[in-house]
Protein backbone atom coordinates (compact mmCIF):
# COMPACT_ATOMS: atom_id res chain seq x y z
CA UNK A 1 0.00 0.00 0.00
CA UNK A 2 1.53 3.33 -1.02
CA UNK A 3 1.72 6.43 1.10
CA UNK A 4 -1.34 8.68 1.24
CA UNK A 5 0.48 11.58 2.91
CA UNK A 6 1.01 14.45 0.50
CA UNK A 7 4.09 15.74 2.32
CA UNK A 8 5.93 12.46 1.76
CA UNK A 9 5.65 10.98 -1.74
CA UNK A 10 7.51 7.81 -2.72
CA UNK A 11 10.79 9.59 -3.39
CA UNK A 12 10.66 11.18 0.06
CA UNK A 13 10.01 7.80 1.65
CA UNK A 14 13.07 6.43 -0.13
CA UNK A 15 15.20 9.28 1.17
CA UNK A 16 13.84 8.87 4.70
CA UNK A 17 14.56 5.14 4.63
CA UNK A 18 18.01 5.84 3.20
CA UNK A 19 18.73 8.29 6.00
CA UNK A 20 17.83 5.64 8.56
CA UNK A 21 19.80 2.86 6.88
CA UNK A 22 22.78 5.12 6.25
CA UNK A 23 23.18 5.43 9.99
CA UNK A 24 23.84 1.70 10.38
CA UNK A 25 27.23 1.27 11.94
CA UNK A 26 28.23 4.91 11.56
CA UNK A 27 27.93 5.68 15.27
CA UNK A 28 28.87 2.19 16.45
CA UNK A 29 25.56 1.74 18.26
CA UNK A 30 25.25 -1.29 20.57
CA UNK A 31 23.69 -4.34 18.93
CA UNK A 32 20.43 -3.95 20.86
CA UNK A 33 19.86 -0.58 19.15
CA UNK A 34 20.25 -2.03 15.67
CA UNK A 35 16.87 -3.73 15.89
CA UNK A 36 15.37 -0.32 15.08
CA UNK A 37 16.76 -0.64 11.54
CA UNK A 38 14.77 -3.81 10.88
CA UNK A 39 11.46 -2.35 9.71
CA UNK A 40 9.18 -4.95 8.05
CA UNK A 41 7.00 -4.06 5.07
CA UNK A 42 3.94 -4.20 7.34
CA UNK A 43 4.55 -2.45 10.64
CA UNK A 44 1.22 -3.35 12.28
CA UNK A 45 -2.18 -4.84 11.48
CA UNK A 46 -5.29 -3.22 12.96
CA UNK A 47 -8.56 -5.10 12.60
CA UNK A 48 -7.21 -6.80 9.49
CA UNK A 49 -5.95 -3.57 7.85
CA UNK A 50 -2.17 -3.13 7.52
CA UNK A 51 -0.05 -0.09 8.35
CA UNK A 52 2.69 -0.21 5.75
CA UNK A 53 6.32 0.65 6.26
CA UNK A 54 5.93 3.47 3.71
CA UNK A 55 3.03 5.09 5.58
CA UNK A 56 4.79 4.63 8.90
CA UNK A 57 8.02 6.26 7.69
CA UNK A 58 6.04 9.01 5.96
CA UNK A 59 4.28 9.89 9.21
CA UNK A 60 7.56 9.89 11.10
CA UNK A 61 9.07 12.16 8.48
CA UNK A 62 6.15 14.60 8.58
CA UNK A 63 5.98 14.71 12.38
CA UNK A 64 9.65 14.53 13.34
CA UNK A 65 11.72 14.76 10.17
CA UNK A 66 13.19 18.25 10.68
CA UNK A 67 14.02 17.58 14.32
CA UNK A 68 15.71 14.24 13.64
CA UNK A 69 17.55 15.38 10.52
CA UNK A 70 18.87 18.46 12.33
CA UNK A 71 20.24 16.24 15.09
CA UNK A 72 21.84 13.87 12.57
CA UNK A 73 23.41 16.72 10.59
CA UNK A 74 24.72 18.30 13.78
CA UNK A 75 26.40 15.06 14.83
CA UNK A 76 27.97 14.65 11.39
CA UNK A 77 29.31 18.23 11.49
CA UNK A 78 30.80 17.59 14.92
CA UNK A 79 32.33 14.29 13.74
CA UNK A 80 33.81 16.03 10.70
CA UNK A 81 35.36 18.82 12.79
CA UNK A 82 36.72 16.24 15.24
CA UNK A 83 38.37 14.31 12.38
CA UNK A 84 40.02 17.50 11.14
CA UNK A 85 41.47 17.96 14.62
CA UNK A 86 42.60 14.34 14.87
CA UNK A 87 40.00 13.57 17.55
CA UNK A 88 37.77 10.50 17.75
CA UNK A 89 35.40 8.82 20.20
CA UNK A 90 35.75 5.11 20.88
CA UNK A 91 32.71 2.91 21.46
CA UNK A 92 33.95 2.38 25.03
CA UNK A 93 34.01 6.12 25.71
CA UNK A 94 30.52 6.59 24.29
CA UNK A 95 29.21 3.62 26.26
CA UNK A 96 30.56 5.10 29.50
CA UNK A 97 28.43 8.17 28.83
CA UNK A 98 25.47 6.25 27.39
CA UNK A 99 25.01 3.41 29.92
CA UNK A 100 24.02 5.38 33.06
CA UNK A 101 21.65 7.55 31.02
CA UNK A 102 20.11 4.53 29.29
CA UNK A 103 19.62 2.94 32.71
CA UNK A 104 17.88 6.12 33.86
CA UNK A 105 15.69 5.98 30.74
CA UNK A 106 14.75 2.35 31.43
CA UNK A 107 13.94 3.12 35.07
CA UNK A 108 12.07 6.33 34.15
CA UNK A 109 14.41 8.42 36.32
CA UNK A 110 13.37 11.66 34.69
CA UNK A 111 15.30 13.90 37.09
CA UNK A 112 18.59 12.27 36.09
CA UNK A 113 17.79 12.70 32.40
CA UNK A 114 16.79 16.33 32.93
CA UNK A 115 20.07 17.01 34.73
CA UNK A 116 21.77 15.71 31.59
CA UNK A 117 19.71 18.14 29.49
CA UNK A 118 17.66 15.34 27.93
CA UNK A 119 13.88 14.94 27.59
CA UNK A 120 12.34 12.00 29.49
CA UNK A 121 10.96 10.50 26.25
CA UNK A 122 14.25 10.49 24.30
CA UNK A 123 14.70 7.38 22.16
CA UNK A 124 17.65 5.02 22.84
CA UNK A 125 19.03 5.77 19.37
CA UNK A 126 18.94 9.53 19.93
CA UNK A 127 20.44 8.98 23.36
CA UNK A 128 23.39 7.18 21.76
CA UNK A 129 23.89 10.07 19.34
CA UNK A 130 23.78 12.56 22.23
CA UNK A 131 26.35 10.50 24.13
CA UNK A 132 28.74 10.48 21.18
CA UNK A 133 28.20 14.19 20.61
CA UNK A 134 29.05 14.87 24.26
CA UNK A 135 32.29 12.84 24.14
CA UNK A 136 33.53 14.61 21.00
CA UNK A 137 32.60 18.09 22.22
CA UNK A 138 34.23 17.42 25.57
CA UNK A 139 37.51 16.53 23.86
CA UNK A 140 37.41 19.51 21.51
CA UNK A 141 36.32 22.17 24.03
CA UNK A 142 37.72 21.05 27.39
CA UNK A 143 40.67 23.46 27.23
CA UNK A 144 38.28 26.41 26.94
CA UNK A 145 36.60 25.66 30.29
CA UNK A 146 38.02 26.64 33.68
CA UNK A 147 36.37 25.87 37.03
CA UNK A 148 37.68 27.24 40.33
CA UNK A 149 36.92 26.41 43.96
CA UNK A 150 34.81 29.53 44.51
CA UNK A 151 32.54 28.64 41.61
CA UNK A 152 32.18 25.05 42.83
CA UNK A 153 31.24 26.20 46.33
CA UNK A 154 28.67 28.64 44.93
CA UNK A 155 27.20 25.80 42.84
CA UNK A 156 27.05 23.46 45.85
CA UNK A 157 24.91 25.98 47.76
CA UNK A 158 22.33 26.39 45.03
CA UNK A 159 19.08 25.36 46.78
CA UNK A 160 18.27 22.40 44.54
CA UNK A 161 21.86 21.16 44.43
CA UNK A 162 22.36 21.55 48.18
CA UNK A 163 19.20 19.59 48.88
CA UNK A 164 20.38 16.78 46.61
CA UNK A 165 23.59 16.40 48.61
CA UNK A 166 21.85 17.09 51.94
CA UNK A 167 18.39 15.54 51.64
CA UNK A 168 15.71 16.26 54.23
CA UNK A 169 14.57 13.60 56.72
CA UNK A 170 11.63 11.50 55.55
CA UNK A 171 8.72 10.55 57.78
CA UNK A 172 6.61 7.42 57.77
CA UNK A 173 3.39 9.12 58.88
CA UNK A 174 0.20 7.18 59.53
CA UNK A 175 -3.09 9.08 59.67
CA UNK A 176 -6.68 8.56 60.71
CA UNK A 177 -9.03 11.27 59.49
CA UNK A 178 -12.69 11.50 60.48
CA UNK A 179 -15.34 14.19 60.00
CA UNK A 180 -16.33 15.02 63.60
CA UNK A 181 -14.31 15.91 66.72
CA UNK A 182 -16.37 13.46 68.78
CA UNK A 183 -15.36 10.49 66.65
CA UNK A 184 -11.73 11.69 66.58
CA UNK A 185 -11.61 11.95 70.39
CA UNK A 186 -13.07 8.47 70.76
CA UNK A 187 -10.37 7.02 68.48
CA UNK A 188 -7.70 9.03 70.31
CA UNK A 189 -8.94 7.53 73.59
CA UNK A 190 -8.63 3.99 72.20
CA UNK A 191 -5.03 4.68 71.12
CA UNK A 192 -4.09 6.06 74.55
CA UNK A 193 -5.65 3.01 76.20
CA UNK A 194 -3.71 0.71 73.87
CA UNK A 195 -0.47 2.51 74.81
CA UNK A 196 -1.18 2.15 78.53
CA UNK A 197 -1.90 -1.54 78.07
CA UNK A 198 1.26 -1.88 75.95
CA UNK A 199 -0.59 -3.33 73.00
CA UNK A 200 0.88 -3.52 69.49
CA UNK A 201 0.26 0.09 68.41
CA UNK A 202 0.93 -0.69 64.74
CA UNK A 203 -1.83 -3.29 64.72
CA UNK A 204 -4.27 -1.15 66.72
CA UNK A 205 -3.67 1.95 64.57
CA UNK A 206 -4.02 -0.03 61.32
CA UNK A 207 -7.29 -1.58 62.50
CA UNK A 208 -8.74 1.78 63.53
CA UNK A 209 -7.64 3.43 60.27
CA UNK A 210 -9.22 0.72 58.16
CA UNK A 211 -12.44 0.80 60.17
CA UNK A 212 -12.95 4.54 60.77
CA UNK A 213 -10.78 6.77 58.56
CA UNK A 214 -12.55 8.70 55.81
CA UNK A 215 -9.28 9.62 54.08
CA UNK A 216 -7.99 8.00 50.84
CA UNK A 217 -5.19 6.36 52.85
CA UNK A 218 -7.67 4.28 54.88
CA UNK A 219 -7.26 1.30 52.55
CA UNK A 220 -3.48 1.61 53.06
CA UNK A 221 -3.97 1.36 56.85
CA UNK A 222 -3.44 5.11 57.11
CA UNK A 223 0.00 5.10 55.50
CA UNK A 224 1.28 7.86 53.21
CA UNK A 225 4.65 6.16 52.89
CA UNK A 226 7.96 7.90 53.53
CA UNK A 227 7.70 11.61 52.70
CA UNK A 228 9.69 14.74 53.52
CA UNK A 229 8.01 17.60 55.36
CA UNK A 230 7.78 19.55 52.10
CA UNK A 231 5.71 16.73 50.58
CA UNK A 232 3.21 16.65 53.44
CA UNK A 233 0.19 18.95 53.97
CA UNK A 234 1.09 22.32 55.49
CA UNK A 235 -0.74 21.58 58.77
CA UNK A 236 1.27 18.36 59.15
CA UNK A 237 4.56 20.28 58.87
CA UNK A 238 3.66 22.40 61.91
CA UNK A 239 2.86 19.30 63.94
CA UNK A 240 5.77 17.11 62.84
CA UNK A 241 8.67 19.58 62.76
CA UNK A 242 9.89 18.47 66.21
CA UNK A 243 8.36 14.99 66.15
CA UNK A 244 10.11 11.85 67.35
CA UNK A 245 9.62 8.27 66.11
CA UNK A 246 6.68 6.61 67.82
CA UNK A 247 4.83 9.82 68.75
CA UNK A 248 1.06 9.91 68.36
CA UNK A 249 -0.49 13.37 68.10
CA UNK A 250 -4.02 14.23 69.32
CA UNK A 251 -6.82 15.20 66.92
CA UNK A 252 -6.12 18.30 64.84
CA UNK A 253 -8.49 19.95 62.36
CA UNK A 254 -7.03 20.18 58.85
CA UNK A 255 -8.38 20.80 55.37
CA UNK A 256 -7.09 18.50 52.62
CA UNK A 257 -8.40 18.64 49.04
CA UNK A 258 -11.29 20.81 50.19
CA UNK A 259 -12.45 18.40 52.93
CA UNK A 260 -12.31 19.24 56.66
CA UNK A 261 -10.93 16.35 58.70
CA UNK A 262 -10.11 15.75 62.32
CA UNK A 263 -6.80 13.95 62.01
CA UNK A 264 -4.76 11.80 64.39
CA UNK A 265 -1.13 11.34 63.32
CA UNK A 266 1.30 8.60 64.30
CA UNK A 267 4.97 9.01 63.37
CA UNK A 268 5.89 5.39 62.83
CA UNK A 269 9.47 6.10 61.73
CA UNK A 270 11.87 8.88 60.71
CA UNK A 271 14.80 8.28 58.38
CA UNK A 272 17.64 10.80 58.22
CA UNK A 273 19.57 10.33 54.93
CA UNK A 274 23.35 10.82 55.05
CA UNK A 275 24.63 14.28 54.16
CA UNK A 276 27.50 14.88 51.74
CA UNK A 277 29.70 17.84 52.75
CA UNK A 278 31.24 20.11 50.14
CA UNK A 279 34.70 18.53 50.25
CA UNK A 280 33.25 15.07 49.57
CA UNK A 281 30.98 16.39 46.82
CA UNK A 282 33.68 18.38 44.98
CA UNK A 283 34.50 15.72 42.37
CA UNK A 284 30.86 15.32 41.33
CA UNK A 285 30.27 19.07 41.45
CA UNK A 286 33.23 19.68 39.17
CA UNK A 287 31.83 17.20 36.64
CA UNK A 288 28.38 18.80 36.75
CA UNK A 289 29.76 22.33 36.43
CA UNK A 290 31.97 21.24 33.55
CA UNK A 291 28.94 19.75 31.79
CA UNK A 292 26.92 22.91 32.40
CA UNK A 293 29.63 25.17 30.99
CA UNK A 294 30.29 22.78 28.13
CA UNK A 295 26.62 23.06 27.16
CA UNK A 296 26.90 26.85 26.94
CA UNK A 297 30.08 26.74 24.87
CA UNK A 298 28.77 23.90 22.71
CA UNK A 299 25.72 25.86 21.55
CA UNK A 300 27.90 28.61 20.11
CA UNK A 301 30.36 26.07 18.70
CA UNK A 302 27.61 24.10 16.92
CA UNK A 303 26.12 27.30 15.52
CA UNK A 304 29.54 28.19 14.09
CA UNK A 305 29.82 24.74 12.46
CA UNK A 306 26.38 25.13 10.87
CA UNK A 307 27.07 28.66 9.62
CA UNK A 308 30.34 27.56 8.05
CA UNK A 309 28.84 24.44 6.44
CA UNK A 310 25.88 26.36 5.00
CA UNK A 311 28.11 29.14 3.70
CA UNK A 312 30.32 26.58 1.95
CA UNK A 313 27.30 24.68 0.60
CA UNK A 314 28.19 21.48 2.46
CA UNK A 315 24.63 20.73 3.58
CA UNK A 316 22.19 19.70 0.86
CA UNK A 317 18.74 18.50 1.87
CA UNK A 318 17.16 16.32 -0.81
CA UNK A 319 13.67 16.20 0.74
CA UNK A 320 11.35 19.08 -0.12
CA UNK A 321 9.47 18.78 3.17
CA UNK A 322 12.72 19.32 5.08
CA UNK A 323 14.13 22.25 3.09
CA UNK A 324 13.39 24.58 6.01
CA UNK A 325 16.27 22.91 7.82
CA UNK A 326 18.76 24.72 5.60
CA UNK A 327 16.91 28.01 5.92
CA UNK A 328 16.85 27.91 9.73
CA UNK A 329 20.29 26.42 10.28
CA UNK A 330 21.33 25.39 13.77
CA UNK A 331 18.36 25.72 16.12
CA UNK A 332 18.08 24.51 19.72
CA UNK A 333 17.65 20.77 19.46
CA UNK A 334 14.60 19.31 21.12
CA UNK A 335 16.22 15.94 21.72
CA UNK A 336 18.92 17.29 24.00
CA UNK A 337 21.18 20.12 24.90
CA UNK A 338 24.29 17.91 24.88
CA UNK A 339 24.82 18.09 28.62
CA UNK A 340 23.37 18.84 32.00
CA UNK A 341 21.28 21.92 32.65
CA UNK A 342 20.29 23.53 35.92
Image: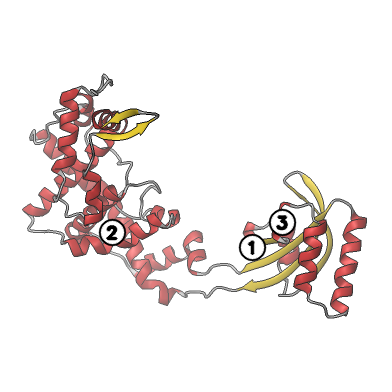
User: How busy is the neighbourhood of tag 3: few (under 14 within 10 Å), some, or many (20 plus)?
Assistant: some
Instruction: From the viewer's perspective, tell me whether residue 107 is left or right of residue 83.
Output: right
State the residue at coordinates (79%, 65%). Answer: 207
Looking at the rendered structure, the secondary structure element under dot 2 is: helix
The residue lying toward the viewer, choosing from 51 and 162, is 51
Looking at the rendered structure, the secondary structure element under dot 3 is: helix
- Which disc number belongs to residue 40? none
Image height of 127 relative to 171, above or below? above
The residue lying toward the viewer, choosing from 159 and 184, is 184
Q: Quadrant of the C terminus?
A: bottom left
User: How busy is the neighbourhood of tag 2: few (under 14 within 10 Å), some, or many (20 plus)?
Assistant: many
Residue 108, percent from left and from top = 43, 54
State the residue at coordinates (22%, 60%). Answer: 94
Image height of 143 relative to 332, above or below? below
State the residue at coordinates (28%, 47%). Answer: 126
Residue 111, percent from left and from top = 44, 55
Image height of 319 relative to 70, above or below? above
For marks 1 and 3, give the CA distance.
Answer: 13 Å
- Which disc number belongs to residue 225? 1
Instruction: From the viewer's perspective, tell me whether residue 288 is left or right of residue 241.
Output: left
State the residue position of label 3.
Answer: 219
Residue mark closest to the camera, 1 vs 3: 3
State the residue at coordinates (14%, 36%). Answer: 18
State the residue position of label 2.
Answer: 98
User: How busy is the neighbourhood of tag 1: few (under 14 within 10 Å), some, or many (20 plus)?
Assistant: few
Amino acid sequence: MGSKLSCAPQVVLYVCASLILARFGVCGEPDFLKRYYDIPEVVAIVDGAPISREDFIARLLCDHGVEVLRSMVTLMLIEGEARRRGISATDKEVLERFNPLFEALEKKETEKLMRAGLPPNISPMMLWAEAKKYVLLEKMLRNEIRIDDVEMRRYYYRPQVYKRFNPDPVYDVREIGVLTPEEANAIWGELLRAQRERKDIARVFSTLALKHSKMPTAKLLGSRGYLSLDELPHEYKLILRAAKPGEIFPPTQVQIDGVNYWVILWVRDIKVPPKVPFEEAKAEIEKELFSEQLALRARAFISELWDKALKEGKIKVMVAALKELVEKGAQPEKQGEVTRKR
